[in-house]
Image (cartoon, coloured by chain):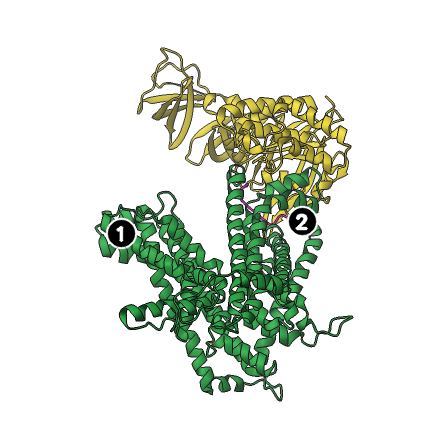
Amino acid sequence: MSLSHSEPVGIRIENLGISFGDTEVLKGVDLDILPGEFFAFLGPSGSGKSTLLRAIAGFGPEPTGRILIGDKDIAHLLPWQRNVGMVFQNYALWPHMSVWRNVAFGLEERKMAKDEIRQRVDDALDLVGLKHLAERRPSQLSGGQQQRIALARTVVVEPRVLLLDEPLSNLDANLRVQMRRELLELQRELGLTTIFVTHDQEEANTTSDRIAVLDQGVIQQVGSPIDLYDKPVNRFVASFLGTANILDGLIKHESGDSVFVSDKGLMLRLDGENDGSASLVFRPQNAFIQHSGDATNSSDNSQLQGTVVEKEFLGSIVRYMVNVQGHQFLIDDIHRRGNPEFIEDSKVKLSIDADSQVVVRY
Amino acid sequence: MTTITWSRVIPRTQWRTTLVALAIALFLATFLLVPVAKVIFVAFQDPNSGAFTLINFKDFFTTSLFQESFWNSFYVASISVIVATIIALPLAYFTTRFNFGGAILIQTLGIVPLIMPPFVGAVAMLLLFGENGSFNLLMDEWFGFTIPLMDGLNGVIFVQSIHYFPFILINLSASLNNIDRSMEEAALSLGASGMRLFRRIVFPLSMPGYVAGASLVFLKVFDDLGTPLLLNVNNMLAPQAYLRISSIGISDPMGYVISVILVVFSLFTMWISFLALRKKDYATVQKGGGGLMKRDLKFWEKLGCYSIVLLILAVVLSPHLGLALLSFGTIWSYSVLPDGYTFDHYIEIFNSAGPFISNTLLYAGLAGLIDVILGIAIAYVVLRTGIRGRKWLDQLAMASLAVPGVVLGIGYLRSFHQTELPFTDTSLASFWLIIVIALSIRRLPYALRACVAALQQVSESLEEAAENLGASKWHSVRRIVIPLMTGGILAGFITSFATAAVELSATIMLVSAEADAPLAYGIYVFMQSAAGRGPGAALGMFAVVIVALGTYFSHRIIERTRHEYVTQTEGDFK
């Protein structure tokens, strides 16, 4: 294996802006990606995540701001001067060349000696386990094989960083899980700093060390998958990652305690938060549901009376929609055989786990 | 995000492509825009004082010969459209409405006429259908009367409509095929059937295709010079323009006035066809079923269909047949068939017409080459760069469709007759290269469309992947984009080559010495004398073979490349 084990480098993006004509698609993006990190750009379509990735590769309109790889600003270099490997969403394998020629292309452009090219291409094809397909045309390969060839073609030139643009979106569900694992293994083996663009939170959560959530051209939050889930900083992140109950309202002080008052008048006690308008977020699994007649264990902060509006059986859990003073909450109850069931229109009591409530400001 | 496409070239990399775009624009301006502008300018200029005037147009419309020519051209073009429609309509109807076994015959009918330039077969048609031609000799013998199929304007109409009807056939069939079956079914379920269904659904939906085809026929016939010239019908616009310039000289304003009229009519008909085709979209929005409902034919209906198709086939093939007879015949006059058969005409052209053939291969080859190079460059600039005004470049190149060959020829004579070439005492207007340039300008639209279609097939990410792996822009284009465009480029080259090889109207204006003349001009010269008809026909057969082979290979190449990469490019754009 002669493929790169050179020191991984970090990527630093400073105040990056991109406009298509009059439309600003990225606004003042600042980001630090650590050497060797598997990093994801996560966001809905139109959020600017692909534009940001393409800007790092040198495609798209000329950006303002800086993109540093290692200590070198590459923002104003041409794509072919950057040595930034990119795997395209549609793989972009050249149909008029054999697999082998596809992989050799980048090395030929680097004017490498023939023997070395042969050695390196063979190594790269070995790495993705497809050496036996070297003479095939790309159109004769399955989607997963094309994906691997695209990867081999990119890593064979030993790029300083690896960019993956929705690499799994063209694969079927089973293959996607398998490729996800292979990608991660390959990344760990090569130690390449990798950025992965996706709109699929599960993909981002399972592969990435850290995630940047983008919306409307702005980075909303950067953090590890669990951080983002447990401590979203705003409504967008809270609702984009997983299911969340979000209440809009105000925080006030009443007799020394801070209290959250929702726009529909629901009151919930909080632990020392500053006054002002805010949203309160909690996840469906962080509330406890019981019959309203049941004995209550405490005069706890968050005991709410509600009515079951809908229920969905999802196997391991039952998800209820409960109406509380006009708010529709989703509440998950772990399903075990013999557990009480709450039928529609029945009165229930909810207690929200105070520790897992998150207050986000606008 | 991935659905958004944008002009992706970063401004600082643009100066080189901008330079290329500017060079092309300069070329097109020099050899298309300026000559045509010059023609229009001269038409409005007083020949003596040089001041702006409408006097030339007044002269034109008060001279009876020109009035007659104007109406003749208009009449011939209009009637040709009608006759072409009468030929095309049943053929389009049979293939799209019935399960008709003769579909291959009809497809052949759609191509065969186009492989022979109309002027080549014109003289042969005289011998077959003229006053003393085979057909009328037989008619006279059997029924005691003759039909003046080839007399004067009739001859032009006859020859043009059997040559150009495929334009209507192709467009109309495409329109009918694009009408979704569900539209017809919807109408049926709502109670419309029979003629009402045809009048309210099928007819309006197929109209755009028909109008597009018909306007193209009108345009081609109105502008054509070769056919009337060879049939010796001179009282039409294009022949008048040619005769004025060639006999009186390039200072006579009438040639320019006629040119302006030709251009105006061309633009007008192109505009109509553009409007029609723009509307066509609504018929093709729906995908799925495709095509009208077809039904099986009863025996008698089938017999009727086949006889109509075979009759049309016979008429359509008659120029080819006539030309072949003429080229192999000894003497053919006042007889149904030639008196005897010989290879002499072919031997004669191989001895004497060598330069015509080599000139043709050289001119058409160079013109085709220029066209694909310009075609690739323009396609790339338009589709893959953000250069301001790139759409204009495309439109400028396509504008040559609206410029009749006569007009371009006159424009070149007027614009370049004083441009001395260095180291020689000839002017640019009489240098052989000017013919090549004229041909390349005239055929550029074909090559350009082929290149644009080819480039659209090449996903942009294929080029980006190459740049990402370290290939410069030029390397990516050379190693990835152009190889993937090969099929389209080749098809464009062949189309340009084959049609340039038989182009007469601009060529005839620009040939200054017979030694520089190409095939089409040679055919014209030979056909002028009765003794030259045999060798002229043999030369014509040669032209037919060139165009036929060209058409065949470009079809083959397009088909093949379509199969080759289809699996790869299908899923490319998400």
Neighbour class for label 1 at 10 Å: few (<14), some, many (≥20)?
Answer: few
Image quadrant in which you'd find residue A317: top left
Q: Is residue B28 above or below residue A122?
A: below
As rendered, which of B116 and A359 lies closer to the eye?
Answer: B116
Q: What SS does tag 2 mark? A: loop
Instruction: Looking at the picture, tell me which residue is in the foreground, A208 or B522.
Output: B522
In the image, is B540 to the left or to the right of A195? Answer: left
Residue behind mark 2: B10
Find chain B in the image and tell me its colour.
green
Q: Is residue B478 above or below residue A286?
A: below
Q: Main secondary structure of the magenta part?
A: loop
Q: Are marks 2 and 1 on the same chain?
A: yes
Task: Count how many numbered circles sit on residues in the image.
Answer: 2
Give, as a three-letter code, the residue at label 1: Leu
> Does residue B8 belong to the magenta stretch?
yes
Q: Is residue B68 left or right of residue A133?
A: left
Residue placed furthest toward the front? B340
Toward the viewer: A42 or A127? A127
Residue A20 in picture, x, y percent from top left: 60, 49
Numbered range of the magenta stretch = B1-11
Q: Amino acid at mark 2?
A: Ile
According to the picture, the residue beneath numbered tag 1 turns out to be: B303
Question: Residue B292, how many percent across, how many down?
Answer: 32, 48
Residue B293 numbered mark, or none: none
Q: Determine the chain carrying the residue at label 1.
A: B
Question: Would residue B216 appear left or right of B358 to someone viewing this image?
Answer: left
The residue closer to the viewer here, B414 or B175, is B414
Residue that protrudes farthest toward the top in the picture: A338
